[in-house]
Amino acid sequence: MFNSAQTEQLYHDLRRANSEAAKKERFLTYVTSVFRNDEKVQDFIRDMAMGAETSVANITRDGRAARGRADSQTDTVIIEWERDLARTGDHAKDQLREYLEGNWRSGQEYKFTLLSTDGVRWRRYAPDWSLLAVNDLMDRNFELREVQAFDLGPATFEEFPFFLDEVLFADEKKVATLENIRADFGDTSRAFINSMTALNRSLPALESQSELKVAFEQWNRFLSIAYGQFDNSPKLFLVHTYLSVFAKFIAYSVITKETASDDDTIRGVLSGRIFDRLNVERFVEDDFFHWVASDEFLPTLRPMFREIGRQIDAFDFSEVREDILKGVYQELIDLETRHALGEYYTPDWLCERVIEELPIERSSSFLDPACGSGSFLRAGGNRRSRFLRKWRRGWV
């Protein structure tokens, strides 16, 4: 258990420190002590110390190439330190945007946690997908959005080490909650940004007689017939493609406790053949998104599949108590489009309330032909499971 007295002393020292360098040095001393028994964290701290004032090339300023120096940069984290974040927070955000742009233009994937801090105030940022046009990720035109804020103070002394563990050092399997899944696969996540970057590289094939063009035209035609007017942009089609891949990869991981990593397994997951062998029938049909597994596109999209697989592997799905898919879908598809497509989720509490009103017997089964991500089926399965436990004990 962490000692809050150390955190309290850090808080007072940071408030007295009168320079960015002093704050950063005091913080490194603190984390070295608090996480002294965690060798992986100690390795990270050494990397962070070695990454001080990292030179970042390929930054664009006033239309010209420039260089910058990140206060702290490792393979996965960029931190911009400020003397007083309340006064210079916007400057810190601009600096982080420049450093991410420079890393991107230098060929790096989006794999960074972006933090600005004065040691007391912490702000985490990610590219704002909602403001991006379809090709902006390829052109590296983006703005940052604040996705998390933490202020160190007497009320948060005990929480601070856990916050640092989450944003800097996390290594243990995460609980698969709706919020955790949304954070790691939603619109500001590493998985989504890198997946959309990979998918955008396929867009030129829309101009030729390719499998992608056929799939896009079918998607457009069938959804227009079913729903009338809707956002039929390539951007929405690629988001739907990402969601389709994400759902299939999660299903494979939950069923097999494995990660789809090699090409044969990836093809099997995307085509559904693997699920057929696992006795999960008709889970994957020949839908609008089968093109991603073709020989033409799989090599280009391989980084996307491995990125999603790596992120899924960070989760423990043994105890899932809520509909974890709807949070990602609702974040990536705007409200107006979801209404137009008839895709709006019933809250978990309402699903459970409706199911509780149904008479349940030992032989009861549930059918929801238009189940979406299965919120009612999940509630029904939970209800039936509770009933069977009572039945086995002779309570009903």
Image (cartoon, grey):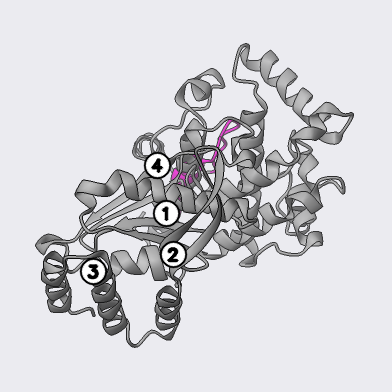
User: Which residue is pictured at 23% across the width and 71% down the height?
Assistant: 22
Q: Marks 2 and 4, Cα distance to the nearest angstrom?
A: 24 Å
Nearer-N-terminus badge (2/1): 2
Left or right of residue 29: residue 368: right
Q: Which residues are magenta?
A: 365-386
Q: Amino acid at mark 4?
A: Arg
Label 3: which residue?
23
Q: CA distance from mark 4 to mark 3?
A: 25 Å
Specify whether 188 is left or right of 107: left
Few, some or many residues within 10 Å of mark 3 (<14, 14–19, 20+): many
| Number of the front mark, 2 or 4 | 4
Q: Work out which quarter of the rendered image holds the N terminus and state it.
A: bottom left
- Can you give x and y, in whole percent of width and height, for residue 281 in the image? 73, 48
Describe residue 190's horizontal placement relative to residue 224 as left or right. left
Q: Is residue 160 above or below residue 190?
A: below
Q: Which is more toward the observer, 340 or 231? A: 231
Q: Badge 4 is on which residue?
A: 145
Question: Is residue 321 something that shows in the picture?
Answer: no
- Nearest to the eye among marks 4 and 1: give it: 4
| Whole-percent x, y for residue 85 in the image | 23, 52
Tags 2 and 1 in contact by the CB under 8 Å rule? yes
Mark in front: 2 vs 3 = 3
Q: Amino acid at mark 1?
A: Asn
Image quadrant assignment for residue 35: bottom left
